[in-house]
Image: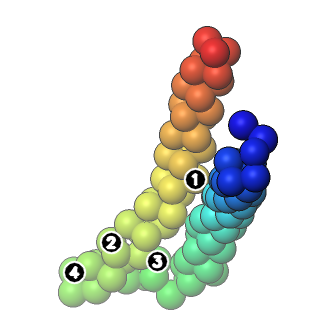
């Protein structure tokens, strides 16, 4: 396994896997912080959108605003749920090896 061609290939594959894992964790962190930022920004705009619920013609703007907040809240919940299950399955597969 440690011949010149195979060793170089294994080294580059290992470095690529580590970089991919590194970028994956930064991507997860970025999505989490982005969802928190969206929630914060939308709550800051609440004084503009809350009165729109009172009138029929502007109720659609309030509904869209509310849907953005709910979807931004669901992103971290679903992301960490899927990450938990993925890491649990990954750990289960690695433990069997």
Q: Is 25 situated left or right of 56 in this image? A: right
Q: Pointer 1 and pointer 4: residues touching (CB < 8 Å)?
A: no
Q: Residue 2: x and y, percent? A: 78, 41
Q: Pointer 3 and pointer 2: residues touching (CB < 8 Å)?
A: no
| Of the two numbered discs 3 and 2 in the rendering, the one whose residue sits closer to the viewer | 2
Label 4 to label 2: alpha-carbon separation: 11 Å
Q: Is residue 89 above or below residue 77?
A: above
Q: Residue 63 got which mark? A: 2
| Residue at the image point whose x is 64% and y is 22% from the top | 94
Label 3 to label 4: alpha-carbon separation: 13 Å
- The residue wearing badge 3 is 50
| Residue at the image point whose x is 68% and y is 48% from the top | 6
Q: Earlier in the sequence, mark 3 or mark 1?
A: 3
- The residue wearing badge 1 is 76
Q: Pointer 2 and pointer 1: residues touching (CB < 8 Å)?
A: no
Q: Residue 44: x and y, percent? A: 63, 80
Which structural element holds mark 4? loop
Residue 38 vs residue 30, the one in the foreground = 30
Circle 3 packing at 10 Å, graded few (<14), some (14-19), many (20+), is some
Residue farthest to the top, as pictured: 96
Q: Earlier in the sequence, mark 4 or mark 2?
A: 4
Q: Earlier in the sequence, mark 2 or mark 1?
A: 2
- The residue wearing badge 4 is 56
Label 2 to label 1: alpha-carbon separation: 21 Å
């Amino acid at each position: 396994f440690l011949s010149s061609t195979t060793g170089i290939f294994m080294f580059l594959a290992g470095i690529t896997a580590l970089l991919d894992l590194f970028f994956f964790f930064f991507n997860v962190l970025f999505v989490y912080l982005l969802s928190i930022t969206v929630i914060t920004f939308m709550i800051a705009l609440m004084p503009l959108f809350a009165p729109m619920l009172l009138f029929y013609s502007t109720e659609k703007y309030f509904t869209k605003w509310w849907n953005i907040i709910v979807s931004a809240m669901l992103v971290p919940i679903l992301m960490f749920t899927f990450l938990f299950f993925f890491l649990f399955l990954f750990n289960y597969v690695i433990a069997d090896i």
